[in-house]
Amino acid sequence: MVTGPVVGDTAVGDTAGRGSRPRRRRVAVLAGVAAFVLAADIITKAIVVAHLRPDQPVHLLGNVFEFWLTRNPGAAFSVGTGETAVFTVIAFGVIVYIARTARKLYSAGWAIALGLLLGGAMGNLGDRIFRAPGLFRGYVVDWIGVVPRYYPIFNLADSAIVCGGILMVILAMRGYHLDGTPRGDEPRGDEPRDAPPGANAPAEENAESAES
């Protein structure tokens, strides 16, 4: 059944339906990337906690690269170590923001960037909820060290957050909107951009006939 005015053989409702499919695909990309990051973060942290000790780091390539179990009460890369509860609230805010932003998402690049950010935020948030010393105050498990004498220890969730942030900056600098339109173009509205001219003409004519 045709649910909208018809132009030629195409209903406006069908055009709107086609316009919503790319958004659903981009949201699926976002969810898939986030799920992959979250799963990888959970699995690697479980392995590290089971097999590494804080006082026995595993060195690779001399002192350039090592696995070292640490507990981080702060944000990514041990920033703000005394503000665990604050970063828990921030992580919740990031997740809510991304969930709301997904309604406007048509860009594959932004979908990947937001998926990395979402998966990383959820990975570290899981530690803050379920690990000691308590609910919403848990310490995040960090275990990757690259030249650890000069750089803090981190985990896969931290890496995903940083990579997502870098990708977002690149997309913003190149002028791409969340809806995939390039610099200079107007962002998409709720209506399809490619609706043919005069698509609503039959509806307007019917309204005028009803008034007469």
Image (tube, rainbow, N blue to C red):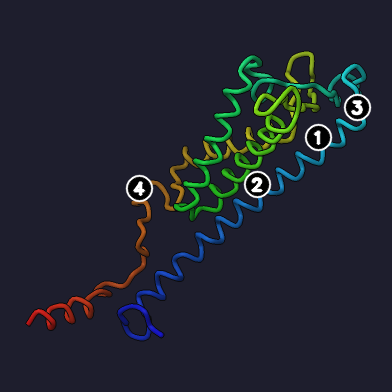
What's the residue type where badge 1 is placed?
Answer: Lys
What's the residue type where badge 4 is placed?
Answer: Gly
The kind of secondary structure element at disc 4 is loop
Residue 195 is situated, as x and y percent measured from the top left of the image, at 33, 70
Q: Which mark is residue 45?
A: 1
What's the residue type where badge 3 is placed?
Answer: Leu
Question: In which quadrant of the rendered view does residue 133 lie?
Answer: top right
**Within-10-Å neighbours for mark 1: few <14, some 14–19, many 20+:** many
- Please state if 55 lies on the left or on the right of 130 as rendered: right
The kind of secondary structure element at disc 1 is helix
In whole angstroms, how far apart are the C-alphas of marks 1 and 4? 44 Å
Which residue lies under the disc numbered 3? 52
In whole angstroms, how far apart are the C-alphas of marks 2 and 1? 16 Å
| First reached walking from the N terminus: tag 2 or tag 4 | 2
In whole angstroms, how far apart are the C-alphas of marks 3 and 2? 26 Å
In the displayed structure, 120 sits above or below 202; it is: above
- Please state if 60 lies on the left or on the right of 115 as rendered: right
- The residue sitting at 92% across, 31% down in the picture is 51
Which residue lies under the disc numbered 4? 184
The quarter in which the N terminus is drawn is bottom left
Mark 3 in CB contact with mark 1 (< 8 angstroms) = no
In the displayed structure, 25 sits above or below 68; it is: below
| First reached walking from the N terminus: tag 1 or tag 4 | 1
From the image, state whether disc 2 or disc 4 is nearer to you: 2
| First reached walking from the N terminus: tag 4 or tag 3 | 3
Which residue lies under the disc numbered 2? 34
The kind of secondary structure element at disc 3 is loop
Mark 4 in CB contact with mark 3 (< 8 angstroms) = no
